[in-house]
């Protein structure tokens, strides 16, 4: 796909559209070794583009894993509260990165973000049944009866949750695997068995586990292998 040089540089977060024009006029940008001042010059993301002699990373598609900390909203923007996008360099917002699904404000753990809207859409589509694993610290003691209730599918106010796997790690600590991602779903499921969730952390999303090297608030780009696994989980080609 080709696009205007000024558009690509703006997408890459180099500067605003008018700032980019000034940078181009000043002859600070080289494309495949030659200075280019024409904002409408057509490039693709494989071009070798350098600003002030530094080669730019021109990949437009990016896929990230973020260790979401508590207290931030999963949203692209919010006027009052801090969002997950505020934890990332502005480049990712400029490229149109979006969260794949949602974690509640107080939920921590693995959040995937991608520039590919179709990938995001398919990964959260209820038909795809991508497994999500959460660790839940709950009030009270989890029992074998809770395991059975989760496995049977819990009727909630507006829908019945699909059968989910609950493993008891400690009296008040459970590992739950769900295939859907309805609003407050895991909290509501534990609430339904009378064990309100105190802390919730997502440990994996489809084929990807949370990278334990990431502290809360830290992120990294996915590897090629991880990207391929994610596309496969979405039934798409990378
Ligand atoms: N289920 C919830 O209740 N909250 C989350 O953040 C994710 C799943």
Image (cartoon, grey):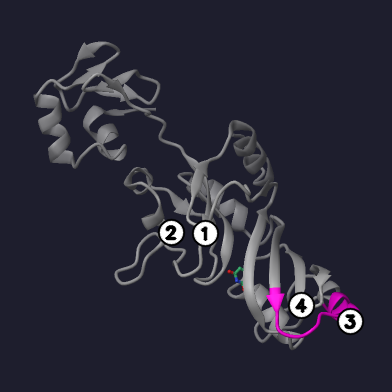
Please indicate, yes or no, whether residue 7 appears anywhere in the rendered image. yes
Q: Which residue is mark 3?
A: 145
- Quarter of image, ligand 1: bottom right
Q: Which residue is mark 2?
A: 84
Residue 2 included in the magenta stretch of the image: no
- Can you give x and y, in whole percent of width and height, for residue 191 in the image? 69, 85
User: What residue is at 19 percent from the left and 42 percent from the top?
Assistant: 16
Q: Which residues are magenta?
A: 137-149
Res 68 label: 1
Tag 4: Cα neighbours inside 10 Å, few (<14), some, or many (≥20)?
some
Looking at the rendered structure, the secondary structure element under dot 1 is strand
Q: CA distance from mark 4 to mark 1?
A: 23 Å
Pick whichever of labels 3 and 1 is earlier in the sequence. 1
Q: Are the residues at dot 3 and dot 2 in contact (C-beta closer than 8 Å)?
A: no
Pick whichever of labels 2 and 1 is earlier in the sequence. 1
Q: Nearer the viewer, mark 4 or mark 2?
A: 4
- Can you give x and y, in whole percent of width and height, for residue 31 in the image? 26, 17
Q: Which residue is mark 4?
A: 172
Q: Quadrant of the N terminus?
A: top left
Q: Nearer the viewer, residue 56 or 114?
A: 56
Q: Are the residues at dot 4 and dot 2 in contact (C-beta closer than 8 Å)?
A: no
Q: Nearer the viewer, residue 135 or 78?
A: 135
Pick whichever of labels 4 and 2 is earlier in the sequence. 2
- Residue 48 vs residue 28: left or right? right
Q: Are the residues at dot 2 and dot 1 in contact (C-beta closer than 8 Å)?
A: yes
Tag 2: Cα neighbours inside 10 Å, few (<14), some, or many (≥20)?
many
Pick whichever of labels 3 and 4 is earlier in the sequence. 3
User: What residue is at 30 percent from the left and 39 percent from the top?
Assistant: 11
Looking at the rendered structure, the secondary structure element under dot 3 is helix
Tag 1: Cα neighbours inside 10 Å, few (<14), some, or many (≥20)?
many
Q: CA distance from mark 3 to mark 4?
A: 14 Å
């Amino acid at each position: 796909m080709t696009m205007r040089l000024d558009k690509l540089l703006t997408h890459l977060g180099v500067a605003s559209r008018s700032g980019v024009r000034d940078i181009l006029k000043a002859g600070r940008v080289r494309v495949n070794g030659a200075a280019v001042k024409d904002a409408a010059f057509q490039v693709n993301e494989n071009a070798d583009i350098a600003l002030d002699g530094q080669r730019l990373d021109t990949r437009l598609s990016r896929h990230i894993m973020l260790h979401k900390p508590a207290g931030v909203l999963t949203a692209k923007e919010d006027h009052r509260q801090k969002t997950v996008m505020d934890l990332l360099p502005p480049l990712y917002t400029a490229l149109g990165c979006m969260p794949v699904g949602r974690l509640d404000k107080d939920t921590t753990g693995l959040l995937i973000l991608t520039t590919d809207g179709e990938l995001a859409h398919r990964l959260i589509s209820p038909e795809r049944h991508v497994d999500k694993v959460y660790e839940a610290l709950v009030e009270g003691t989890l029992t074998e009866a809770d395991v059975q209730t989760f496995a049977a599918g819990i009727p909630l106010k507006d829908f019945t949750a699909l059968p989910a796997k609950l493993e008891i790690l400690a009296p008040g600590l459970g590992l739950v695997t769900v295939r859907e991602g309805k609003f407050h779903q895991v909290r509501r499921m534990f609430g339904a068995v009378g064990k309100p969730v105190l802390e919730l952390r997502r440990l994996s999303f489809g084929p990807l586990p949370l990278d334990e090297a990431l502290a809360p608030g830290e992120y990294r780009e996915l590897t090629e292998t991880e990207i391929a696994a994610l596309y496969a989980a979405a039934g798409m080609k990378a």
